[in-house]
Image (cartoon, grey):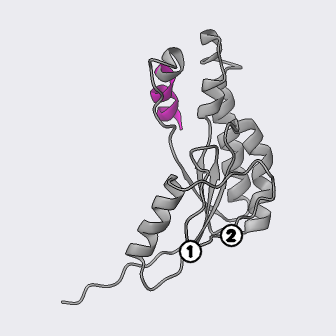
Amino acid sequence: MVNAIPQLLKTKLLAFGDSITQGKPPNGVVQVDSNPEVNNKDGSYVNQLDQKLKDRYKDQIATLIASGIGGEEAGKGKLRLPGVLDAAKPDALLLLEGVNDLTNTTDPSMLTGPNSSSQSVLEALSNMCASAKSRNIKVFIGTLTPLNPAKYFSQAAVIQPLNDQI
């Protein structure tokens, strides 16, 4: 029996987000964002994903575009995304934003509920998904990464409930 070689349906991927997304795969992926704050770093999940794509989909070329800005909150990402989508014209969006909204909130009472950091993240992610979908771009949302409870006690407790809503 001959096994079929796996095929990607979408081959131009945009990884968009904050410092967790900062990265530029070693094969010289296109960097579409001319913003000087965009910082491409080795070792990011983008680099790891790029290698996994190359290893698994050997007879296809997948383009992975990294556009991450360290410290970016979801609300700023919401404003930045349309221009990046229009410039990159990806088939799919890998979206990972929101943890900075929590880490930048020092008042625990502002982490949940109406007008909270959590609500702001959800609204920004919803807006970003709508922006991509209106351009016929498939969206994959990453849930927020865990936080160190020793450093971010109140914020760390909000991650799982927020991820459940994402």
Label drawn at residue 153: none
Q: Quadrant of the N terminus?
A: bottom left
Q: Is residue 102 magenta?
A: no
Residue displayed at 64% across by 55% down? 40
| Amino acid type of the residue that numbered disc 2 sits on in the rendered structure | Val
Please tell me how crowded label 1 is: few (under 14), some (14-19), or many (20+) other residues with Cα within 10 Å. some
Q: Which residues are magenta?
A: 157-166
- Residue 91's place in the image compared with 158, above or below, is below
Which mark's residue is nearer the viewer, 2 or 1? 2
Q: Disc 2 marks which residue? A: 30
Near mark 2 (Cα within 10 A), the count class, few <14, some 14-19 or many ≥20, is some
| Residue 166 visible, this orientation | yes
User: Magenta segment: does it hold 162?
Assistant: yes
Name the quadrant containing residue 100.
top right
Instruction: Decide which of 5, 71 is in the foreground and name it.
Output: 71
Q: In the figure, 157 relative to 83: above or below?
A: above
Measuring from the top left, give residue 84's x and y in whole percent: 76, 59
In the image, taking residue 31 as reference, residue 2 lies left or right, namely left
Q: Are marks 2 and 1 in contact (CB under 8 Å)?
A: no
* Residue for point 64% across, 43% down: 18
Residue for point 54% across, 20% down: 155
Q: Could you say whether the residue bearing mark 1 is in a helix, strand or loop?
A: loop
Pick the residue in front: 23 or 156: 23
x and y percent of residue 77 in the render? 73, 44
Q: Nearer the viewer, residue 118 or 55?
A: 55
**Label 1: which residue?**
11
Query: Residue 118 falls in which quadrant of the image?
Result: top right
Q: Quadrant of residue 55?
A: bottom left
92 relative to 38 in the view: left or right: left
Name the amino acid, label 1: Thr
Mark toward the start of the polypeptide (2 vs 1) = 1
Asked if residue 43 is positioned above or below residue 76 in the image, the reply reads: below
